[in-house]
Image: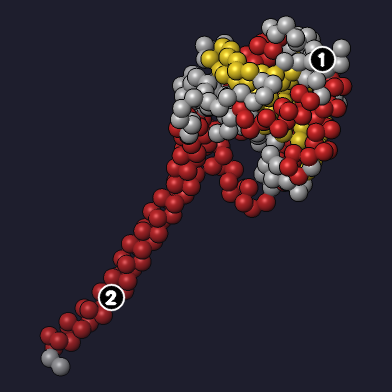
Amino acid sequence: MSTEQRLRAVMVSASEPRRRTTRMRVLRVAIALALAAALGGYYVGIPALRVWQATRVPNLLRPEGPPSAAPAGYHEVAFTTSDGLTLRGWYRPSESGAAVVLTHGYALGREHLLPQADILATAGFGVLTYDLRAHGASDGTVCTRGWLETEDVLAAVAFLAAQPDVDPARIGAFGFSIGGQATLRAAARSDAIRAVVADGPVAGVYADEPRAQGVREQIDAPAKRVYYAVLGVMPGAEPPPPLVVELRGLAPRPLLLIAAGGGLEQRQAQRYVDAAGDTASIWEIPEAGHGGGLASRPEEYGRRLTEHFRAGLRP
């Protein structure tokens, strides 16, 4: 080997560690960028997408054409919210002077709570089941996770109070999921609601969320914070106070919370019961999924629902 060849070999050998170091640096930067992109997507992108889904999708899923005809015994009604939206629903008059407004959950409609409405109507209660804003045949284009839907519940209560067959001092409210949260908030703000049942009510703001348990919930906690922060910049919808604060004014009116499946839903209900005080209670249905209590235990569900409103809305 010539001297020139030996020098070239030495130079190549000396430069190889530097090349490996450079490649490792590039690889580490690429991994860091990929990880940052993944974390940014999980903790920012996905929560932002969930806000769009929560606020806009129900309006996009409205059925085409006129709403279904009112079931036997019910008739079509309409009433106006404090912010000028017309809500539409079905009303069945009261036989006893007492009446209950029923508020559905996300991306559902007035027909979803007809089974509960029929149970109460059979027991003599007047019942109003209606489409929330941006759902079904009601006005509006944006959902607000129960924030402005509280005004929908209060408008429905005002409608009942104006009916000739209803005693305004004997009005109750039932709500499911987001409708349950809006119903709880409406009851906390208005003494016109004398008894409340909420089936699977969800959190309205981050402060209402149960404390994270387990690795998965701990990982998801920052994403939930971002979700509520993005939700808070919706035009026309200011974040309300935590429901766990507002519920302190509910007693002595009776509250029944229905929690299906255990886990997070049970812990959420427990937070609301703790806030509402001694006149609040939980009925747990561990074998049911979210909203599946009536299907799992139809007789007991109907009995508990009827007994709660009979006791809370007695003359």
Q: Seen in the image, is 27 located left or right of residue 307?
A: left
Checking the image for residue 16, the label placed there is: 2
Is label 2 in contact with label 1 (beta carbons under 8 Å)? Answer: no
- Quarter of the figure that contains the N terminus: bottom left
Mark 2–mark 1 distance (CA, rounded to whole Å): 91 Å
Task: Please say if 122 is above or below 164.
Answer: below
Q: Seen in the image, is 284 located left or right of residue 58?
A: right
- Closest to the observer, 276 or 29: 276
Question: Tag 1, which secondary structure?
Answer: loop
Q: Residue at x 83, y 32 (%)?
A: 304
- Residue at label 1? 96
Amino acid of disc 2: Glu
Residue 196, how many percent across, how many down? 76, 24
Q: Residues within 10 Å of mark 1 (few under 14, many from 20)?
A: some
Is any part of residue 240 visible from this angle? no
Task: Please say if 117 is above or below 221.
Answer: above
Question: Tag 2, which secondary structure?
Answer: helix
Residue 176, how many percent across, how many down? 67, 32
- Closest to the observer, 8 or 73: 73
Is any part of residue 11 visible from this angle? yes
Q: Seen in the image, is 126 located left or right of residue 216?
A: right
Task: Name the colour scheme.
Answer: secondary structure
Q: Residue at x 79, y 42 (%)?
A: 297
Give the residue furthest to the front. 72
Q: Residue at x 38, y 53 (%)?
A: 33
- Quarter of the figure that contains the C terminus: top right
Q: Residue at x 48, y 34 (%)?
A: 61
Label 2 or label 1, whichever lies nearer to me, is 1
